[in-house]
């Protein structure tokens, strides 16, 4: 099983840990109380001043990157596969018959999956948790259950509102491992995802 799946599964567990399912499968807060605004309750968490509605991309997650964008990131002859990301609808772009490079994007479908949820897991769920340079005011956070940057793996959370993120995981090609920061490469993918969901691709 690819490392990216494990990373996304860990994120799923971390985001779901604050909720328990009811009999109809809808998550509800374990305390029974409304959670405070995560951007104000967790120190250092950046706010999203201009939230983006990503409902359309939750219905079609593979629309988050265009063919031209994928070719720019991975090269030609890529395969696009929609899938269930555990925490929400997801899409994987990869080179057929290879394990790397690849890009995963997951649109979290939980009541609260904002940047604060990742900050809360710093040092516990996530051994890697570092803020990266925002993209046009939207926060980007590198995270991983283990720090696998030396192996060419990194995931970033792109904040689209104070309670929603898009998880973007990238596995570098063998040729790029050790020559380029995989978190910087994942951020480049996030730049393109943000352009697409804002309609500016």
Image (cartoon, grey):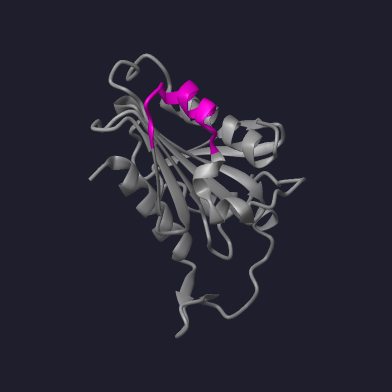
Numbered label tally = 0
Query: Which quadrant would the C terminus be assigned to in this image?
Result: top right
In this orientation, which residue lies closer to the viewer: 44 or 191? 191
- Relative to 159, does residue 67 appear above or below in the rendering? above
- Relative to 145, does residue 112 appear above or below in the rendering? below
Q: Where in the figure is residue 166, as x and y percent of width and height? A: 54, 46
Residue drawn at (59%, 30%), measured in percent from left and top? 191
In this orientation, which residue lies closer to the viewer: 184 or 45? 184
Q: Where in the figure is residue 66, as x and y percent of width and height? A: 54, 33
Residue drawn at (39%, 52%), measured in percent from left and top? 83
Q: Residue furthest bottom?
A: 23
Q: Is residue 132 visible?
A: no
Query: Which quadrant would the N terminus be assigned to in this image?
Result: top left
Q: Where in the figure is residue 31, as x and y percent of width and height? A: 55, 78
The reply to whether the magenta stretch includes residue 182 is no
Residue drawn at (70%, 55%), measured in percent from left and top? 40
- Within the image, what quadrant is residue 163 found in? bottom right
Q: Where in the figure is residue 60, as x and y percent of width and height? A: 53, 51
- Relative to 73, does residue 35 appear above or below in the rendering? below
- Relative to 93, does residue 1 appear above or below in the rendering? below
In this orientation, which residue lies closer to the viewer: 165 or 73? 73
What is the span of residues highlighted in magenta in the rendered image?
65-79
Residue drawn at (34%, 27%), measured in percent from left and top? 152
Q: Is residue 193 left or right of residue 98?
A: right
Q: Is residue 41 left or right of residue 78?
A: right
The reply to whether the magenta stretch includes residue 78 is yes
Q: Is residue 5 visible?
A: yes
Q: Is residue 56 left or right of residue 1?
A: right
């Amino acid at each position: 099983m690819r490392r990216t799946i494990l990373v996304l599964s860990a994120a799923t567990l971390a985001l779901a840990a604050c909720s328990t399912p009811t009999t109809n499968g809808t998550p509800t807060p374990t305390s029974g109380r409304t959670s405070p605004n995560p951007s104000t309750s967790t120190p250092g968490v950046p706010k999203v001043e201009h939230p983006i509605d990503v409902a359309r991309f939750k219905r079609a997650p593979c629309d988050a990157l265009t063919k031209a964008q994928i070719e720019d990131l991975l090269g030609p002859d890529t395969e696009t596969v929609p899938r269930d990301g555990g925490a929400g609808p997801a899409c994987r772009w990869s080179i057929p018959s290879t394990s790397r490079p690849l890009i995963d994007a997951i649109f979290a479908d939980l009541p609260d999956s904002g940047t604060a949820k990742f900050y809360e897991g710093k040092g516990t769920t996530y051994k890697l948790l570092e803020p990266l340079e925002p993209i046009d005011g939207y926060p980007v956070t590198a995270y991983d259950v283990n720090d696998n940057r030396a192996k060419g793996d990194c995931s970033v959370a792109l904040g689209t509102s104070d309670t929603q993120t898009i998880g973007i995981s990238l596995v570098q090609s063998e040729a790029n491992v050790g020559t380029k920061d995989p978190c910087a490469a994942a951020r480049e993918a996030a730049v393109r995802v943000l352009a697409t969901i804002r309609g500016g691709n």
